[in-house]
Amino acid sequence: MNINKVYILKDRAVLYVTGEDVKDFLQNLITNDIKKVSDDNSCFGSLLSPQGKFLFDFIIIKHKSGFFIDCEKDQSKELFKQLNVYKLRSKIEILDLSNEFVVTALSYQKFLTLEKAQDIEGYTLKYREDSVLLDPRNKNLGARLIINLEKLYLSLKKLDLKNANIEEYYSHSHKLGIVPKNLNKLQNKLFGIECNYDELNGIDFKKGCYVGQENTARIKLKNKLSKRLLPINIIEGKLYEGESIFSNEIEIGKVLIESEYPFALIKYLDKNFDQSSKFTTKEASISIKKPDWIDK
């Protein structure tokens, strides 16, 4: 990522959860520990089904007396509804502030030039009263600025940042092996832990119960993780959602996201999965490489 570029992530939404019971409410739902989130630290987390299957993921940032939830816009309405389903009698308020706040992405190098910045994933500081955080998933994704829309362009000018093509950011994320968009295609198709959330700092195995915790913990503790979500690179041809991937006519995975920045659920421990090989689908020849940050 170029130090002078910024990406305005118009595909992201900003929800706000606040109220007397907000910490207990989120703690009982999400895969990460809400106690980690403070004025100087943000975290990545997800909301799973009771069976531990993926539903939503998001970044949580402290804001005033509550928390911002930075999520994909295409998931925001459904996430908003799901949080309200779990609300019951909790003394909380859930707001969609996407018309007031915007999420932008800037480089890791630019973040380190800011006053008081620290080279710690999730580290959060204030710039003109708005939160800037080093991406809690992986610092190579750069930093995020959650900013009031009215202040956006003046702040970008003061930071000497130039608006760049969002596709560059998507491509960078895909090359890192982190899904940039189309998360709805993953819903209920795989376990949250198969999304590499452990390695992306998105699961806390020491916290108490949360939705989907039982299967997540079982897969982890019994070393049952045999499949992972991995990025696909198309050599030639066309992919189709849900189709099988083969290595020498032996199935080793399925395509889950077929368009733009594709991903597949791969049997990464299978003896037939060799990253140096070419893989095939019905109409495509592809390559699959496991990101360096997995199994470090």
Image (cartoon, rainbow, N blue to C red):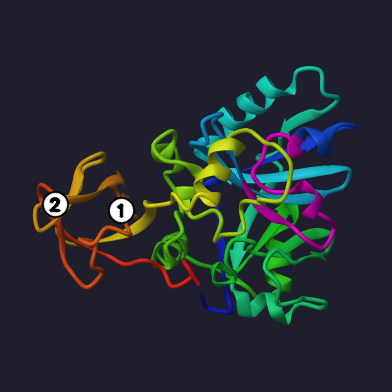
Range shown magenta: 26-45
On the image, which quarter does residue 8 sit in? bottom right
Pinpoint residue 1: horizontal percent, then vertical percent: 51, 75
Relative to the observer, which residue lies in front, 143 or 254?
A: 254
Q: Are marks 1 and 2 in contact (CB under 8 Å)?
A: no
Residue 233 in view in this figure: yes
Q: Residue at x 62, y 51 (%)?
A: 203
Amino acid type, residue under disc 1 in the picture: Lys
In the image, farthest residue toward the top: 89
Identify the element where label 2 is drawn.
strand
Pinpoint residue 76: horizontal percent, then vertical percent: 58, 35
Q: Residue at x 23, y 67 (%)?
A: 274
* Mark 1–mark 2 distance (CA, rounded to whole Å): 11 Å
Q: Residues within 10 Å of mark 1 (few under 14, many from 20)?
A: some
Compared to residue 11, the image places residue 198 above or below, namely below
Q: Which residue is mark 1?
A: 267
Relative to the observer, which residue lies in front, 39 or 132?
A: 39
On the image, which quarter does residue 145 sit in? bottom right
Q: Which residue is mark 2?
A: 250
Amino acid type, residue under disc 2 in the picture: Ile
Look at the image and say whether residue 40 sits in the magenta stretch: yes
Q: Residue at x 27, y 58 (%)?
A: 270
Identify the element where label 1 is drawn.
loop
Q: How many marks?
A: 2
